[in-house]
Image (tube, grey):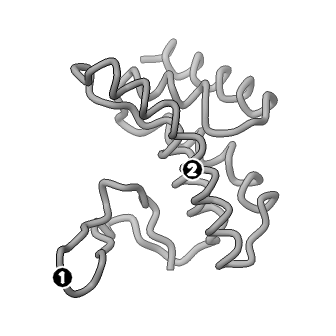
């Protein structure tokens, strides 16, 4: 079962009982877990903070973001047995599909510049992003 939109806003924590609950299963589906993980990776690396976030908080967030995402990916790979290569093979289609979503401009721009270490994917996403902004 793939969630399709797994990120921190879709996890509810509780003080007692179960430590957490995953919510918002509207996009839940059967599919390739590597694609689901790639979707989470793109969301986590391109998500933005509200415009009025204090500069110190923004800087702290950006400083730890990549480390937290890398830890999450590594832990996911250990538990699932899925390879980084399998996840990365989904990065371009997932990121391209996300550009078609109704995202704030700041988050769309962040997505083009982050989400993977592959410069080829960044260039391809930039081309896709440029094409979609020219047609709007």
Nearest-to-viewer mark from 1 and 2: 1
Which numbered circle lies on residue 101? none
Q: Is residue 86 above or below residue 95?
A: below
Residue at the bottom extreme? 17
Q: Is residue 89 above or below residue 122?
A: below
Can you give x and y, in whole percent of width and height, for residue 29 in the image? Answer: 47, 74
To which quarter of the image does residue 25 belong? Answer: bottom left
Q: Dot 1: what SS?
A: loop
For the point 59% across and 38% down, the residue is 96
Q: Is residue 1 above or below residue 73?
A: below
Q: Are marks 1 and 2 in contact (CB under 8 Å)?
A: no
For the point 70% across and 74% down, the residue is 78
Label 2 neighbourhood size at 10 Å, few (<14), some (14-19), many (20+)? some
Q: In this view, does 89 lie to the left or right of 35?
A: right
Q: Earlier in the sequence, mark 1 or mark 2?
A: 1
For the point 44% across and 69% down, the residue is 3
Q: Dot 2: what SS?
A: helix
Quadrant of the drawing holding the C terminus: top left
Residue at the top extreme? 134
Label 1 neighbourhood size at 10 Å, few (<14), some (14-19), many (20+)? few
Which numbered circle lies on residue 69? 2
Can you give x and y, in whole percent of width and height, for residue 66 in the image? Answer: 59, 40
The residue tagged 1 is: 16
Q: Is residue 124 above or below residue 20?
A: above
How far apart in space, not on screen, are marks 1 and 2 (Cα)?
26 Å
Q: Is residue 61 left or right of residue 56?
A: right
Number of numbered tags placed on the structure image: 2
| Relative depth, front residue between 102 and 116 | 116
């Amino acid at each position: 079962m793939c969630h399709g939109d797994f990120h921190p806003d879709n996890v509810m924590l509780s003080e007692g009982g179960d430590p957490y609950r995953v919510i918002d299963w509207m996009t839940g589906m059967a599919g390739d877990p590597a694609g689901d993980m790639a979707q989470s990776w793109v969301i986590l690396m391109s998500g933005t903070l509200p415009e009025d976030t204090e500069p110190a908080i923004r800087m702290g967030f950006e400083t730890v973001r990549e480390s937290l995402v890398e830890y999450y990916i590594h832990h996911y790979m250990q538990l699932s047995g899925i390879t980084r290569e399998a996840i990365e093979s989904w990065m371009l289609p997932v990121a391209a599909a996300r550009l078609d979503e109704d995202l704030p401009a700041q988050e769309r721009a962040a997505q083009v510049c982050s989400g993977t270490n592959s410069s080829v994917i960044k260039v391809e996403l930039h081309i896709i992003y440029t094409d979609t902004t020219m047609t709007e």
